[in-house]
Each structure stands twice: as C-alpha cells, then as structure tokens.
Image (cartoon, rainbow, N blue to C red):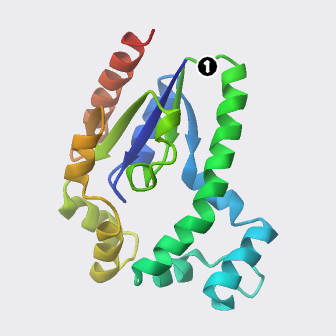
C-alpha cells in the first residue's frame, strides 16, 4: 500500500486530478471535505466564532465560509490563527481515515491537502507527493469565474507557496494548463509510476 499526498495551488486542478486518481482505483482522503464536516460541528463553530467574531456565523448558526475567508485572506496573522486552530483537527481525521483504509489493504491512497507544503504536518505520513499546477493567469481566471474580485483572487494565491516552488518540492507534477483529457493522460502516467515503483 502506498500513501501519496496530492497538492497544488488554489484553482490549479487538485479536484480534477483527485477525481481521475479515484477513477483509476485510488482511495481518496480529501482535507477540504474534512474541513467542511468539521465546520458543521458545534464545538468547532463555537471555537471559530470565539476567535473570529460572531459575524462569521449565519443567522442559523452555520459558518459563513465567505465571511471567514474575507477575514483571513486580508490578514496573514488571522490566516495563521485559523490554520493553528483547524489543522490539528484535520490531520487527526486524516490519520483516522488512513488507519481505516490500511486495514482494508488498499493499493493506493491519495491524500488531498491544499496546504501540504505550507503546514508540513502530513508529510511524514506520505511515501510520495504530487503537485497539480497551471499558470497564475489560469488560476486568476478560474477564481474570477467563482465570483471573486481580482484583488480577492490575488490575495488567495499569494497566501500559498508559489506553484513553481511546489513543483520543485514534489516528487511528481501534473500540468493542468490544458484539457481535462490531457490532464488525465498525465495523471495515468503518475499513477503507473507510483505503483510501478511500489515495493
């Protein structure tokens, strides 16, 4: 069994590559989905509203992720605080899911962590790392399509390690600047290389 970390920049194509790895037979653990589940827990909502104010809650008491993002991406200290609060909970759940999958003797497990190199907490769990990348202009375009302003998009991109640097840090890189079909071919190539080199 091989455990691989999949990362990239915001809007670089991590979700597409994860979907393609799943279609090839890998099991996926997605940190973003874990965060979404955590935000539904009352204790986490209380923790975040205590640290970032009750304005991050909707009238029904849910986390307003857009409002929270506005706070943390306009202030690096607030972003670091959010990461300090949430990351330990995320990595605890990643470990729990890994333990469950190991018992089932899965061939390949792909752990999708957007801030893999920024936080570094998951790195000891991983055999290899894969980064999905595209140009900064493509990131901006994709974020603008999500109704973010150019300033908001740039703030989110600049909050992460540059993609060019992540490519150098990873064992494998998947170029997602072209079509989904082209990305699929590159994902298949990485999938075969990882399993081909597995003990």
Q: Is residue 78 above or below residue 108?
A: below
- Mark 1 = which residue? 106
Quarter location, residue 54: bottom right
- Front in this rendered view, residue 134 or 107: 107
Find numbered disc 1 in the image and state the secondary structure of the residue it sits on: loop
Residue at image coords 48%, 32%: 126
Residue at image coords 49%, 44%: 112
Where is residue 49? Give x, y as percent: 69, 82
Quarter location, residue 20: top left
- 151 with respect to 125 (left or right): left
- 88 with respect to 174 (left or right): right
- 94 with respect to 187 (left or right): right
Res. 134 in view? no
Q: Is residue 70 above or below residue 196?
A: below
Please give the count of numbered marks on the rendered protein.
1
- Front in this rendered view, residue 78 or 20: 78
Where is residue 6? Give x, y as percent: 42, 40
Residue at image coords 36%, 71%: 156
Quarter location, residue 40: bottom right
Res. 95 in view? yes
């Amino acid at each position: 069994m091989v455990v691989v970390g999949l990362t990239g920049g915001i809007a670089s194509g991590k979700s597409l590559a994860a979907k393609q790895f799943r279609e090839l037979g890998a099991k996926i653990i997605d940190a973003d989905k874990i965060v979404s589940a955590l935000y539904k827990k009352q204790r986490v909502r209380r923790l975040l509203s205590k640290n970032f104010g009750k304005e991050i809650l909707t009238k029904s008491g849910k986390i307003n992720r857009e409002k929270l993002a506005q706070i943390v991406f306009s202030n690096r200290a607030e972003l670091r605080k959010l990461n300090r609060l949430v990351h330990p909970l995320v990595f605890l759940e990643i470990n729990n899911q890994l333990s469950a999958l190991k018992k089932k003797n899965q061939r390949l497990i792909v752990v999708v962590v957007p801030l893999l190199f920024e936080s570094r907490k998951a790195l000891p769990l991983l055999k290899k790392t894969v980064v999905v990348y595209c140009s900064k202009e493509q990131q901006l375009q994709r974020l603008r399509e999500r109704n973010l302003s150019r300033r908001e998009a740039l703030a989110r991109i600049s909050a992460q390690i540059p993609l060019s640097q992540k490519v150098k840090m990873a064992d494998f890189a998947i170029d997602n600047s072209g079509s989904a079909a082209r990305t699929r071919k590159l994902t298949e190539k990485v999938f075969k290389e990882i399993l081909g080199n597995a003990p």
